[in-house]
Amino acid sequence: MMTIYLFGVQYQEYTKINQIHKFACDYLSDWFPNLGSYQAFCNRLNRLGGAFTRLSELLLEDTQPNDCIIDQCLLDSMPIITCSGKRKGKVANEVTNKGYCSTKGVYYYRMKLHMLG
């Protein structure tokens, strides 16, 4: 699961789990014959939270500054809004998708910024 997810995000540049699952079903079924349904795929990914945490720790160990404490990490993400959902976005179409802000009750085109420190 982790391999499929990371490959889909990094090399195929997919931003949604359903895109990654569809790609794996269409092109990787020979390597992963027991992939299962989309719901099973999501459940398995959710159970890998600890593995993603450990992978992040290992990556940070290789690149951490001298004054960094490894067991104190911050991971955050935020949307970068490129335009409202009333029209199709013209900026960075290959990396943006339509999202919904539940607190403001609006649709918009956005990309996600993820920060790990």
Image: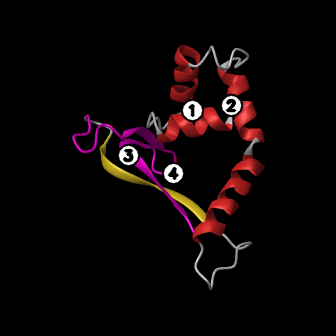
Report how far apart the C-alphas of labels 1 and 4 lie in the structure: 23 Å
In the image, is residue 90 part of the stretch drawn in magenta? yes
Q: Which residue is rendered at x = 28% and y = 43% of the image?
A: 92
Q: Which residue is mark 2?
A: 42
Badge 1 or badge 4: first in the primary sequence = 1
Q: Residue furthest left?
A: 90
Q: Which amino acid does the dot numbered 3 rest on? A: Arg
Vertically, is 49 above or below 54?
A: above
* Numbered disc in front, either 4 or 3: 3
- What is the quadrant of the N terminus in the image? top right
Report how far apart the C-alphas of labels 2 and 3 lie in the structure: 22 Å
Q: Which residue is rendered at x = 69% and y = 24% of the image?
A: 39
**Mark 4, secondary structure of its residue:** loop
Badge 4 or badge 3: first in the primary sequence = 4
Res. 61 image quadrant: bottom right
Q: Which mark is residue 103?
A: 4
Badge 3 or badge 1: first in the primary sequence = 1
Report how far apart the C-alphas of labels 4 and 2 lie in the structure: 25 Å
Q: Magenta region: which residues? A: 88-117
**Mark 1, secondary structure of its residue:** helix
Tag 1 near tag 2, CB within 8 Å: yes
| Left or right position of 117 against 42 | left
Q: Which mark is residue 40?
A: none
Q: Which residue is mark 3?
A: 110
Badge 1 or badge 2: first in the primary sequence = 1
In the image, is residue 76 part of the stretch drawn in magenta? no
Q: Would you call the spot at circle 1 few (<14 residues within 10 Å), some (14-19), or many (20 or more)?
A: some
- What is the quadrant of the C terminus in the image? bottom right
Report how far apart the C-alphas of labels 1 and 2 lie in the structure: 8 Å
| Left or right position of 77 against 109 | right
Q: Which amino acid does the dot numbered 1 rest on? A: Ile
